[in-house]
Amino acid sequence: MRVLGIETSCDETGVAIVDTSPWEAGEPAGKGLLGQALYSQIAMHVDYGGVVPELASRDHIKRVIPLINQTLKESKSTLEEIDAIAYTQGPGLAGALLVGASVAKGLALALNKPVLGIHHLEGHLLSPLLANNANIQFPFVALLVSGGHTQLMEVTGVGEYAILGETLDDAAGEAFDKTAKLLGLSYPGGPAVSALAKQGTSGTYQFPRPMKHSGDLDFSFAGLKTSVLTQVKKISQAGTLSDQDKAHVARGFVDAIVEVLVSKSISALKQSGMKTLVVAGGVGANEQLREALEIACQKEGVAVHYPPLHLCTDNGAMIAFAGAMRLKKNPQLASKDWGFDVRPRWPLDQLS
Ligand code: KG4
Ligand code: ZN
């Protein structure tokens, strides 16, 4: 089965074609990734310090067809050889989602192929299996850390997700992006804060570990951002905020957020009795988080898996792959229903 995946939920236009035959033959699923193309709008949004929804939708319209053609060429596939089309149905920016949904439904109608709406977070959640499916067995605990979401999930199979805990306010990626803004770094802030933190010394500035001891698996990062703001103001009032000061602040912030994410992930593993942790979403690319999780998981005797770096942030491969996995499990899920409804807000545990 060949599935074309289309992702347009935010500021990346992603397209990919996945073939299920290698993994049906017991080989790594990654071998079935026949081709993929990605266009990031980051440069367009950078002057605004964040994603401008209307600009995002317009740019998806411009990019999506050329990216589909590029992916078909790379995959040495024709449209007729595609068996099903998967697109991101939500959550995300409504206008941006509508672009991917209309292209997917239009193509499916023209080609008379089935089409399936995919939950963006399910795409992230299953993406580590795309690279490493031989080593990852259900059930597992998933730490989903993106720009819009921070959740711990219990994953018992494809389409079987229960939320163990989630952020009560800002997502981890949002905290990185807001901290970056406070430090005068450009959008998206995660990679910039992470790089700057390497030049700083732990403990120079201490920040709270929000909800570390709350006894549940929820998170809260809005207060952390306020503490960073207060610290930055304090340093600025006492003199000038030097590049070295900024690096120390970045280090303190990264230490705090990583400590909370690691501590809650370990608690989730202990509570559920599961032995595997899968990390997904943009913040899953963070070096300091990966290092700390590696140490903590080794100590607890549990395995930790991440997608390769290029699959951590938004991409079409994760949508094509999630579509293929869902259809392999239940071919009835794909429909020839040409009406489209996107779901800008869509809790993952409400996936049918
Ligand atoms: O998963 P993603 O590409 O998009 C959403 O679905 O939100 O995640 C984007 C988020 C941004 O907030 C970005 O700053 C963060 O992931 N991010 C990082 C890193 N790379 C991306 N955060 C920390 N460290 C990184 N290396
Ligand atoms: Zn995402």
Image (cartoon, rainbow, N blue to C red):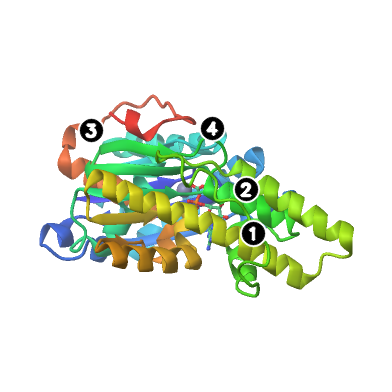
Judge depth for marks 3 and 2 and give the one in front: 2
- Residue at mark 4: C-beta within 8 A of ligand 1: no
Q: What amino acid does circle 4 point to?
A: Ala
Q: Is residue 288 above or below residue 137?
A: below
The CA span between labels 1 and 4 is 39 Å
Q: Which mark is residue 206?
A: 1
Q: What amino acid does circle 2 point to?
A: Leu
The disc, 2 or 1, on the residue closer to the chain's N-terminal end is 1
Q: What amino acid does circle 3 point to?
A: Leu
* Residue count near mark 4 (Cα–Cα under 10 Å), binned few <14, some 14–19, many ≥20: many
The CA span between labels 3 and 2 is 42 Å
Query: Considering depth in this image, is 59 or 347 the residue closer to the camera?
Result: 347
Question: Residue at the location (62% across, 62% down)?
Answer: 252
The CA span between labels 2 and 4 is 29 Å
Quarter containing the C terminus = top left
* Residue count near mark 2 (Cα–Cα under 10 Å), binned few <14, some 14–19, many ≥20: many
Q: Which mark is residue 94?
A: 4
Image quarter for residue 52?
A: top right
Image check: 329 left or right of 244? left
The disc, 1 or 4, on the residue closer to the chain's N-terminal end is 4
Say which residue label 3 marks.
333
Query: Considering depth in this image, is 218 or 85 the residue closer to the camera?
Result: 218
Residue 270 location, x and y as percent?
27, 49
The disc, 2 or 4, on the residue closer to the chain's N-terminal end is 4
Residue 195 location, x and y as percent?
60, 70
The disc, 3 or 1, on the residue closer to the chain's N-terminal end is 1
Image check: 73 left or right of 223? left
